[in-house]
Amino acid sequence: MTSTANTISLSLPTTHNPSSLSKPKSLPDFYLRFRNQNPKLTRVGISVTSPNNRIRTLSTIRASTASVMEASSKEKALPTIVEVDLGNRSYPIYIGSGLLDQPELLQRHVHGKRVLVVTNSTVAPLYLDKVVDALTRGNPNVSVDSVILPDGEKYKNMETLMKVFDKAIESRLDRRCTFVALGGGVIGDMCGFAAASFLRGVNFIQIPTTVMAQVDSSVGGKTGINHPLGKNLIGAFYQPQCVLIDTDTLNTLPDRELASGLAEVIKYGLIRDAVFFEWQEKNMAALMARDPSAMAYAIKRSCENKAEVVSLDEKESGLRATLNLGHTFGHAIETGFGYGVWLHGEAVAAGMVMAVDMSYRLGWIDDLLVKRVLNILQQAKLPTAPPDTITVEMFKSVMAVDKKVADGLLRLILLKGSLGNCVFTGDYDRKALDDTLRAFCKS
């Protein structure tokens, strides 16, 4: 039986062919051209050149891209800047190498005299001292406290979150304080939720140290914790003052974490940026080898995609939900298998394969796209099927409480049409979902 529900279709607003865009009347268009895979800065409205030398048009956002200028031995490189346009709550994403050695970037976003750095036991020995120095160098009026949480998705819960509140209250922080999230997606989500809740809201800053956090979770203001019955079911939309991405932090990232983050990079290409996906197919080996130029471009392009969508649909009323391709299946894997057993990106990768399989069963995409998705995920050394222990019933029970359920109807993000197009819909043949679940589960 086919259900009826509103369908939100996302076709390529990010196409590299300006003539194919219908320009909205209420928002300005910005024309950018990128010179290479590690673009040099320009501000909004200035043209630059893409990896394929074609003009890129960004409409409906102010996602400005600032260039990384060639620095002399006496000058520091300026960061690339992507702006998340949310009116008076807009904020910059700084991207570049060595940004933690530029204290002015962080200090300009600290408005009071007290800072609480929230980090974990893995990241703290590597970068906590550097961040404290960046916050206080030449700025003696600022005092910094820190709280070090256990590392891992299994600790993304209320008990661990209380440690942040305990430290904030014990330190007598007030409403002019700033929380700083130093770590991956778990730390960013928990620190952001703590900031949204403490004294009913204090400022916070994101310093993501994993690919996953740099290309996705640190941008857009989704914060929260897990519940035993479902992932990210408790939380708030709460935007940071800025996101500072020092790409040097990826030098200490384990290979498995690197691959996990690339799942989100691949997602952007599949749902809305065909040219970016094609670039990834040609450059996945360079990304896996941590080539600085390729990695910088992938982070920047991912942030541009995320910034555009968030600017248009901050609270996920429709368009933003398309960023969750594979996540409904993936969250079920994480919940059913146990939080932290698989990394988030690993579960999302298997979930994307399942979403693509279902899209094919519905006749919405061709088999060539299915093969391309499998191929690029395999290149990234990511799973392409859920664990054997996950059953059809486990999938269904967890998916029934997914955040995208509305009035009892499970809405999914599925691919439809050519590469770079997707829909967010509850209007699909339920048999296709059942067939996909049975094809990937042993029982």
Image (cartoon, rainbow, N blue to C red):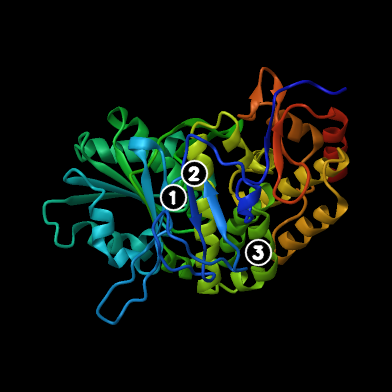
Of residue 235 and residue 364, the one placed in the foreground of this image is: 364
What amino acid does circle 3 point to?
Gln
Q: Residues within 10 Å of mark 2 (few under 14, many from 20)?
A: some
Q: Name which residue lies at 41% across and 49% down.
A: 83
Mark before the other along the chain sequence, 2 or 1: 1
Which percent across, then down, holds residue 408? 70, 19
Query: Would you say 245 lies left or right of 369 here?
Result: left
Query: Would you say 13 lies left or right of 391 here?
Result: left
Mark before the other along the chain sequence, 3 or 1: 1
Of residue 307 and residue 335, the one placed in the foreground of this image is: 307
Query: Would you say 41 lies left or right of 14 here?
Result: left
Q: Name which residue lies at 36% across and 71% down.
A: 69
What amino acid does circle 1 point to?
Pro
Query: Which residue matches tag 2?
Result: 155
Which percent across, then down, holds residue 201? 31, 31
Query: Could you say which quadrant of the image residue 90 lies in?
Result: top left
Of residue 147 and residue 283, the one placed in the foreground of this image is: 283
Which percent across, then down, holds residue 80? 40, 62
Query: Which residue matches tag 1?
Result: 150
Q: Are marks 2 and 1 in contact (CB under 8 Å)?
A: yes
Which percent across, then down, holds residue 288? 61, 70
Query: Which residue matches tag 3?
Result: 280
Query: Could you say which quadrant of the image residue 412 lies in?
Result: top right
Label 2 SS = helix
Label 3 SS = helix
**In the rendered image, is residue 294 in sight?**
yes
Quadrant for the N terminus, please. Answer: top right
Question: How far apart, in angstroms, are the residues tagged by discs 3 and 1?
Answer: 34 Å
